[in-house]
Amino acid sequence: MNTDQAFYMLKEAGLSDSRSIQTVRRWLNEGKVKYDGTGSRNTEAFSVFDNAASALVKERTDQDKDKDEIIRYLKLKIKEKDVYIEGVEELHKTATKVLSHQRDMLTNEIIQLKNEKRKLHNETMDLLKENIQLREELIKLKEEMLTGENSENDKLYNTVQYDLLQKFGLSKKASSNEVLSAYKELLKLTHPDHGGNTKLFHYIKTDYDNFRNSIK
């Protein structure tokens, strides 16, 4: 390889003119180039060893390959991050849908419980009115029993007893203890500690006491 070929090879490798001249001079000092003895003693008169020039070109080529590898690696990492971000976004959408569905379910459940509470309150009030009527009939029955009207009193007592059993959903064969148990359940339901109405609780308690005393 002559001097011109070596010089242009360095140029093609990306070095400037001044850098090429400095490189040739350094190689001369290191023994990597030799003076061919032709022409004037300047940079164009140097002959570069083929292996030294080839090594420089190879070094530049390897650097380009490394850069390409780095670029491919970075692109791959960017793609992985994009996939990760898409996964997080999809997970967020799914979680939002689930939370929204759960919120709707809880809202519907609250509405249903409020309706049931309102219905139960109305049923309790109706039962209270019916119990008032039954208590008045029981009081009347006790008064008439004291006057000695036994046959009529027995008939009236049986009628009141049967009505009371119907109100509590009990059978005709239900005992007085079963009626008392039904009263107790109603008292628990209306107790102030359980969110019931204080006035209503005391009224039912009075009715319960009257019935309990009537069967003694």
Image: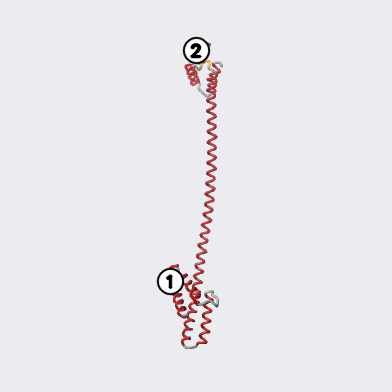
Neighbor class of circle 2 (other Cα within 10 Å; few <14, some 14-19, many 20+) is: few
Q: Assign a secondary structure to mark 2.
A: loop
Front position in the image: 202 or 147: 147
Q: Position of residue 3 (x, y in %)?
A: 54, 16
Q: Assign a secondary structure to mark 1.
A: helix
Q: Are marks 1 and 2 in contact (CB under 8 Å)?
A: no
Residue 198: mark: 1
- Residue type at mark 1 is Thr
- Residue type at mark 2 is Arg
Front position in the image: 156 or 102: 156
Front position in the image: 101 or 134: 134
Give the alpha-carbon distance from disc 1 to disc 2, as whole Å.
121 Å
Neighbor class of circle 1 (other Cα within 10 Å; few <14, some 14-19, many 20+) is: few
User: Which residue is located at x 49 percent, y 72 percent?
Assistant: 124
Image height of 106 relative to 120, above or below: above
User: Which residue is located at x 51 percent, y 67 percent?
Assistant: 116
Q: Quadrant of residue 169?
A: bottom right
Residue 41: mark: 2
